[in-house]
Image (tube, rainbow, N blue to C red):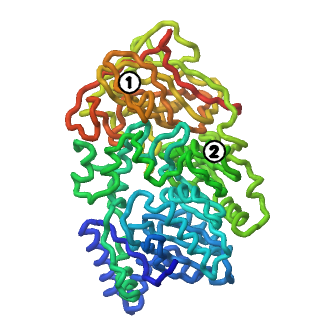
């Protein structure tokens, strides 16, 4: 494949005029206030140059904006960093992403970049097609398979390459690796995929369609992502622009590196939900299409997810955290892959999305101290790449197949296969007076209640249960009292534990219920209540009830009919300490984290009216609702 030189990265992103003017004024003020014009130029170039922002400009030879041609003629903007102090040939680490290139090694991963460069690795960072300076249209995981394959072929054709490529990255940088691994490029020798849940499609037990759905409920958490990054079309330079002019233009527009802060979309309450992004003027994105697709729609098979129909053989180090939005998908994909391909390893920490490496002696995950969770991630990563890309004989493969942190214990544990051996413990839902809110008497009992009972709550889409815990910021774990105090939330709590209880694996629930409507949602949250009464979320399960039998074949309910419903979607490793209590919260909304079900039974994303649903949860006797916990010995 032919290549041509091109300039430094362009970060064309829609930003408020004030933000753009602010960056321009910053440069002007810096230039006017500097005694020597060269200092202003240096300031300007640093702001536009990821190598300068990474702080390694003196350590690498940087070839920015190499335009690498794909098989269909589209060219992708690619940076190549070669170590100055070490002679070629080099093993190469490739990162592909839709974000500004500087984010490939930002935060904690900046130390990993330095470690790779110091140990003689070439670094290649590439914009996905249709993003920033790369040509073409952007679609979610755009070109993850063929573009990734063609880029590896280009790398190993370079005179500085040793013919071996490893892939690396978190979030989108990891999701790109999933489908690429299925192509089994002979030079793709190893991968490190961190937080890769959105790159995963259908596996046994998983049908989240790249995290767009959670139990068939659209995850509204991703609307800000599409608002910031997901545009199908962007301003692009014509191929005829000379390289020098392209380079200068890229440096100018490369100043636009930030994103608009949008904690949760202010327009989330807009109806119909399919028009939420359009209502705030967002250009077309794939979200506009995805929100109108049911989770069982065959059109999902066109997306570039890794599925059980693929057969990747690339040695893989899967890395994630228990409070990541895609933790369940990553673990289930690994659970499947561990028996399908050799050299598959899993590391699971306690933090949120892409926060691996931030752990301390007192690791705070949201508002909660989960203990000393420190782990030498970068040493493990370098060991992995050294083994596969340098033929260095080390302990990369003699490490345990699975290493996981048991939250609240200050212990890292290991296993040879997932899930670890565990004993099922059932906790049965029960109440006498009623389980509405934490002021009720809802309980989780170790013995099956002989007396049949039920609890009813009223869900009004106009007044949904508010989101407290977010997946992508510091509020990933929060105190749950404001939710537990609501009458439209059923709360069931165990007695204080007499000894530590370690839960490792998949938590499920069976709930017998009826509803006054043809369709509504069921949401269950697992909560840890400490001796002081503070209650912290552990994990959530959701299900849109029309999908209670199958995502492929939805079936509406008959109002008043009683159904047994299986809830899945929680995977965790957590210790409920002695004196703590286990709690679940049952309700029908978590908004705006997830789309509201308007309860009509029609196509929810197109609805503009809603009806109130009364849901009754049954317990005891022949309709015993229960929570199932995988308990391991401590």
Quadrant of image for the C terminus: top right
x, y percentage for residue 282?
A: 26, 58
Along the polypeptide, which appears first: circle 1 or circle 2? 2
x, y percentage for residue 177?
A: 55, 59
x, y percentage for residue 314?
A: 64, 57
**Which residue is rendered at x = 35% and y = 18% of the image?**
456
Residue 61 visible, this angle: yes
The vertical placement of 386 against 347, above or below, is below
Q: Secondary structure at mark 1?
A: loop
Query: Crowdedness of circle 1 by 10 Å Cα count: few (<14), some, many (20+)?
Result: many
What residue sits right under mark 2 in the picture? 405
Q: Looking at this view, is 502 or 333 the one in front?
A: 333
Give the distance between the C-alpha atoms of the residues marked 1 and 2, in whole angstroms: 32 Å
Residue 484 visible, this angle: no
Q: Is residue 523 left or right of residue 24?
A: right
The vertical placement of 324 against 281, above or below, is above
Q: Secondary structure at mark 2?
A: strand
Q: Residue furthest right?
A: 393
Are discs 1 and 2 less than 8 Å apart at CB?
Answer: no
- Tell me which corner region of the image, top left, top right, bottom left or bottom right, holds residue 561: top left
Q: Is residue 297 left or right of residue 343?
A: left
Query: Crowdedness of circle 2 by 10 Å Cα count: few (<14), some, many (20+)?
Result: many
What residue sits right under mark 1 in the picture? 437
**Which residue is rendered at x = 65% and y = 54% of the image?**
375
- Tell me which corner region of the image, top left, top right, bottom left or bottom right, holds residue 153: bottom right
Mark 1 or 2, closer to the camera: 2
**Which residue is rendered at x = 59% and y = 52% of the image?**
319
Q: Residue furthest front?
A: 72
x, y percentage for residue 614?
A: 30, 21
Label at residue 426? none
């Amino acid at each position: 494949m032919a290549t041509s030189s091109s300039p430094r990265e362009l970060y064309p992103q829609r930003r408020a005029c004030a933000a753009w003017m602010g960056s321009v004024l910053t440069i002007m003020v810096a230039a006017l206030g500097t005694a020597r014009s060269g200092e202003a130029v240096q300031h300007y170039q640093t702001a536009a140059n990821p190598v300068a922002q990474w702080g390694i400009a003196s350590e690498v030879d940087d070839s920015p904006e190499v335009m690498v041609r794909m098989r269909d003629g589209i060219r992708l903007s690619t940076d190549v960093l070669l170590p100055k102090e070490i002679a070629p040939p080099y093993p190469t680490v490739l990162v592909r992403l839709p974000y500004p290139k500087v984010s490939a090694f930002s935060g904690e991963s900046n130390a990993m970049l330095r470690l790779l460069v110091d140990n003689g690795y070439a670094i290649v960072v590439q914009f996905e097609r249709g993003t920033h300076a790369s040509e073409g249209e952007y679609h979610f995981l755009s070109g993850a398979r063929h573009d990734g394959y063609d880029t590896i072929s280009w790398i190993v054709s370079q005179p500085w390459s040793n013919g071996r490529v490893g892939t690396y990255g978190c979030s989108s940088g990891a999701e790109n690796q999933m489908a690429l691994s299925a192509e089994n490029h002979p030079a793709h020798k190893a991968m490190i995929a961190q937080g890769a849940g959105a790159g995963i499609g259908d596996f046994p037990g998983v049908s989240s369609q790249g995290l767009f759905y959670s139990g068939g409920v659209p995850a509204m958490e991703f609307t800000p992502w599409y608002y910031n990054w997901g545009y199908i079309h962007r301003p692009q330079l014509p191929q005829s622009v000379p390289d020098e002019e392209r380079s200068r233009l890229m440096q100018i527009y490369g100043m636009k590196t930030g994103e608009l802060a949008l904690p949760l979309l202010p327009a989330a309450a807009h109806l119909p939900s399919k028009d939420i992004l359009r209502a705030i003027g967002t250009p077309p994105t794939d979200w506009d299409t995805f929100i109108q697709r049911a989770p069982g729609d065959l059109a999902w098979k066109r997306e570039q997810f890794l599925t059980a129909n693929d057969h990747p053989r690339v040695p893989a180090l899967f890395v994630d955290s228990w409070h990541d939005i895609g933790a369940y998908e990553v673990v289930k994909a690994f659970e499947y892959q561990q028996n399908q391909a050799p050299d598959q390893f899993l590391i699971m920490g306690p933090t949120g999305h892409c926060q691996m490496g931030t752990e301390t002696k007192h690791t705070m995950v949201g508002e909660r101290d989960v203990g000393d969770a420190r782990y030498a991630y970068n040493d493990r990563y370098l060991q992995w790449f050294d083994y596969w890309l340098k033929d260095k004989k080390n302990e990369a493969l003699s490490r345990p197949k699975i290493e996981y942190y048991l939250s609240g214990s200050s212990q890292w544990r290991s296993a040879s296969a997932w899930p670890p051996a565990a004993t099922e413990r059932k906790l049965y839902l029960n109440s006498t007076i009623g389980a509405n809110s934490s002021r009720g008497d809802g309980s989780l009992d170790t013995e099956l209640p002989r007396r049949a009972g039920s609890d009813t709550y009223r869900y009004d889409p106009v007044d949904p249960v508010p989101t407290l815990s977010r997946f992508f910021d510091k509020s990933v774990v929060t105190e749950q009292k404001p939710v537990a105090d609501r009458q439209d939330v059923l709360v069931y709590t165990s007695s204080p534990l007499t000894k530590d209880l370690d839960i490792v694996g998949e938590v499920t629930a069976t709930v017998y219920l009826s509803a006054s409507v043809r369709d509504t949602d069921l949401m269950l949250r697992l909560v840890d209540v400490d001796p002081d009464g503070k209650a912290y979320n552990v994990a959530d399960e959701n299900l849109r009830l029309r999908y209670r039998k199958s995502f492929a074949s939805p079936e509406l309910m008959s109002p008043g009919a009683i159904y047994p419903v299986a809830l899945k979607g929680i995977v965790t490793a957590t210790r409920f300490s002695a004196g703590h209590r286990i709690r679940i919260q049952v309700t029908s909304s978590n908004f705006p984290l997830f789309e509201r079900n308007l309860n009509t039974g029609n196509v929810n994303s197109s609805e503009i009216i809603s009806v109130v649903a009364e849901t009754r949860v049954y317990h005891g006797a022949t309709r015993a609702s229960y929570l199932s916990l995988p308990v391991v010995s401590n």
